[in-house]
Image (cartoon, rainbow, N blue to C red):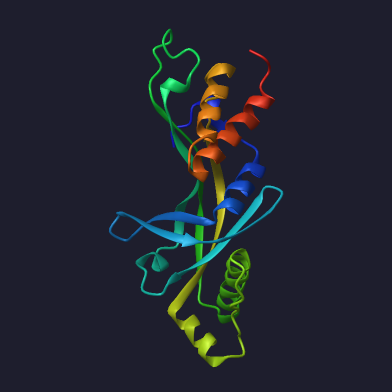
Amino acid sequence: MYTPRAFAETDLGELDRLLARDPFVTLVSTGPDGKPFASHLPVLYSREGDRILIEGHWARPNPQATHGGAALMIVHGPHAYVSPGWYADKEEAARVPTWNYAVAHLDGKLEASTDEAFLASIVDRLSIRHETAIGSDWRYEHDREAHRGQLRGIIGFRFVPDRIELKFKLSQNHPAANVRGAAQALREQDDLRSREVAAMMLERLDRRPPD
């Protein structure tokens, strides 16, 4: 991923935040034919210090379940269009449109598993995480044959990244007045992503030494 120094983020706490916000990733691997293959999957994320573990599952017919080995996982954060009309110096600096966003690329290795206990744990934890979030109460019940039987339709995976790249492109290369102007305009947009980007921009501006 192309990451200018101004946009590079090294705090793994920011990765925690991205995956807490949206634990739905793009997983890219290479098949036997040498071509890249992508899946879009909900995942379970945990971190102890610098050690990260990401777990999930594929539908059994998904070709990616047979790949294993090296893979790239893309974690998507909020993103928003930024108009040059929002900058304080738009005329004298001849500013142009851009896009602000936060994203993470994780390189690591996939380990597939068909162990029933592991699959049951994945389904159980995913359902608890997302059912709770929407105020619903469906739960995986391992004692029910109908539920256990569904496990035959999936293959689980563990993913341990050995390289993590975080890119937070949030107008850090602009004067503070431009950041404030763009953030204020984004806060007034009628969509959550724009407001999230605005909050991230202002957080980083608060950490910046005065211009």
Query: Which quadrant of the figure contains the C terminus?
Result: top right
**Quadrant, the N terminus:** top left
Q: Position of residue 179 (x, y in %)?
A: 55, 23
Q: Residue furthest top?
A: 92
Q: Quadrant of residue 177?
A: top right
Relative side of 1 to 44, left or right:
left
Q: Is residue 5 above or below residue 152?
A: above
145 shown above or below 175: below
Residue found at x 47% / y 40%: 79
Q: Nearer the viewer, residue 9 or 110?
A: 9
Residue ID at (63%, 68%):
132
Residue 27 horizontal/vertical position (percent): 44, 56
95 lies left or right of 148: left
Left or right: 101, with 211 as reference point: left
Coordinates of residue 111 in the picture (x, y in percent): 51, 64
19, 58: nearer the viewer: 19
Q: Position of residue 28 (x, y in %)?
A: 41, 54
- Residue extending farthest left: 33
